[in-house]
Amino acid sequence: MIGVTRFFRDEKVFEVLADSILPAIFEKHTDKSEIRVWVPGCSTGEEAYTIAMLIKDYMLRNNILNDVKIFATDIDEDSLSYASSGFYPSNISADVPQKYLVKYFVRHDNGYQINDNIRRMIIFARHNVIDEPPFSKLDMVSCRNLLIYIDLETQLQILSTFHVCLKPDGILFLGSSESLGKLADGFDILDSKAKIFKKRNRFKPEFYPSSSISVPLHRNRTDLSLQNAGKLMKQGSRHLSYVFEDIVNSFLPPSVIIDSNYNLLYFIRNAGDFLQIPQGEMTINLLRMLPKEIGVAVSSVIRRAEKKNGEIISMEIVTMKQQINITCKRIVTVDDDFPCYYISFAEVHVSDAVKIDEKTLPLDISNQYQERIEELEREIQHKNESLQATVEELETSNEELQSSNEELIASNEELQSTNEELQSVNEELYTVNAEHLRKIEEMTELNADYDNLLNNTQIGTLFLDKDLVIRKVSSVASNITNIIQNDIGRPLHHLALSTLYPDFIKDVDHVNETLQSIERELPYRNKVYFMRIVPYRTKEKAVKGIIITFIEFTALKEAVNAASSETP
């Protein structure tokens, strides 16, 4: 086993998981029940934390409060200890999208620490998926890139275990190079590229691991005999599979079965004799494991078999060591979501060379190289045309951007000009504002002068507008007429002023209509006032209202009366 893992490994696959699978899982848990996920072979925990972050993010976006348990298991205790700490080096920023890095990690000097909300969702435990009892009632099992290191029989056992421990319609999540093999009938394909499958509820695996099945108590002999019959049927099915495998190995030449990505799925007989392990990173790609000359031939027959759906394509190749007949057939599935190719390698002896089928095509390596070169040239030409079209689009976009830039520059200049105009207007407003302040000060001084003049000369003054609405009243006039400051703005007719003399309001109306002044002697509270009602005229001689003045001349009146009485 090798512990190769990282956060968001195969990012597009996790996008499918977040966008399509998680909504379906949560839709079945509307009762706030617990969601259970198992990640066997978790290594140092990056995949388990990735799934936890996706689930947590979905729950936050949709305001969901379900309890989530993620069981992350492995047989390497050192890896589990590292995963449990939740502390990872700084270079994970290249794998973790920025939004998850900010939301679910705490930055330190030498790395990132997963936050407690994510850590509490995961239970790390040592567990051997091959021979220990599995977890039960699971909504999803994510077992990615573990089965490729295990032989086919053990793969069948593990996949059967997953089928048993999943809930109805539970989700199985495999790696890009893994397949269901003989257990394909037990799952529906949700996404063939992402290798996401859904459990078929009525399917019963032929092989159940003994550790995952509890032995029931037998109440009578009938139950015992039925169970024994079931065991015998299961054992018979297993033995029958061995019989079929022996027949296949006896009659078929060395062969392999590969998927559409040329990854090995199954070996028949001694097909490994034609393969070699390449240097560098481990791979199960057939073309990389074949010698160069044979690899060219296999690539050619696969391309021809792909064009001729279901038809057997044969080709003969002569190498420095041997003469080989290569046969390829595209295996067509029911829904064609998982195309496979059967490829056989038959070594041709000199005595058998004349017996080759007429459909077998002798391979000219030079022609195959030339054909491959022409195909690559066509691809390059196509890419060059696409690149040229892209360049032209970029040039057009660049011209449009340049035109937009020029328009923006012109708009910027206009805005600058407008800004200068606004600054000029602003300066003018400052000047006008200063003038207004000066005028206000002058008006304040004039009002103060007016008030002092009226109060000191003891001349009562009442100002009315053209509608005989009170505009201003001095203190002396207020004492005589009982008009107060709160009455300013009220019509004169609304006030009871007949106490001055009965025709006071009529005299005011008469002056307002005829613009002829009226003068009266007005006795008031043991005093005598000289009252004048005159039109209020502006500088331009326009009439804007009425002025009523009250001048006391009590002493003068008494002196006149005294003088009159002394005169014979």
Image: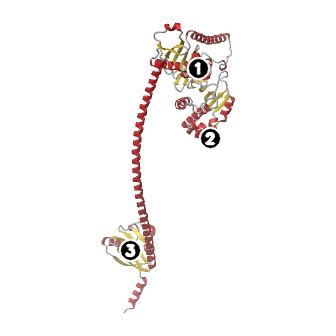
The residue under label 3 is: 548
Instruction: Decide: few, some or many residues near mark 2? Use Cα within 10 Å; few <14, some 14-19, many ≥20.
Output: some
Nearest the viewer among 38 and 88 is 88
One can see residue 339 in this view: no
Mark 1 Cα shell of 10 Å, populated few (<14), some (14-19), many (≥20): few
The foreground one among 415 and 548 is 415
Q: In the picture shown, does residue 271 fall above or below 76? A: above
Amino acid type of the residue that numbered disc 2 sits on in the rendered structure = Val
Q: What's the distance in space between the residues labelled 3 and 1, CA to CA?
A: 125 Å
SS of the residue under disc 3: strand
Answer with left or right where residue 503 lies relative to residue 300.
left
Task: Single out the residue that lies furthest toward the front.
Answer: 320
Comes first in the chain, label 2 or label 1: 2
- Mark toward the viewer: 2 or 1: 1
For numbered disc 2, what is the local secondary structure?
A: strand
Q: Earlier in the sequence, mark 2 or mark 3?
A: 2
Q: Is residue 559 left or right of residue 24?
A: left
Most distant residue in the bottom direction: 568
In which quarter of the view is residue 392 placed?
top left
The CA distance from mark 2 to mark 3 is: 85 Å
Give whichever of discs 3 and 1 has the lower sequence position.
1
Nearer the viewer's eye, disc 2 or disc 3?
Answer: 2
Q: Are marks 2 and 3 in contact (CB under 8 Å)?
A: no
Q: Which mark is residue 106?
A: 2
Is 407 left, or right, of 338 in this rendering? Answer: left
Distance (Cα) linking label 2 and label 1: 46 Å
- Asked which colour scheme the image uses, the reply is secondary structure
> Label 1, on which residue?
276
**Residue depicted at x 57% and y 18%:** 275
Q: Provide residue 258's location: percent of width, then percent of height.
A: 54, 19
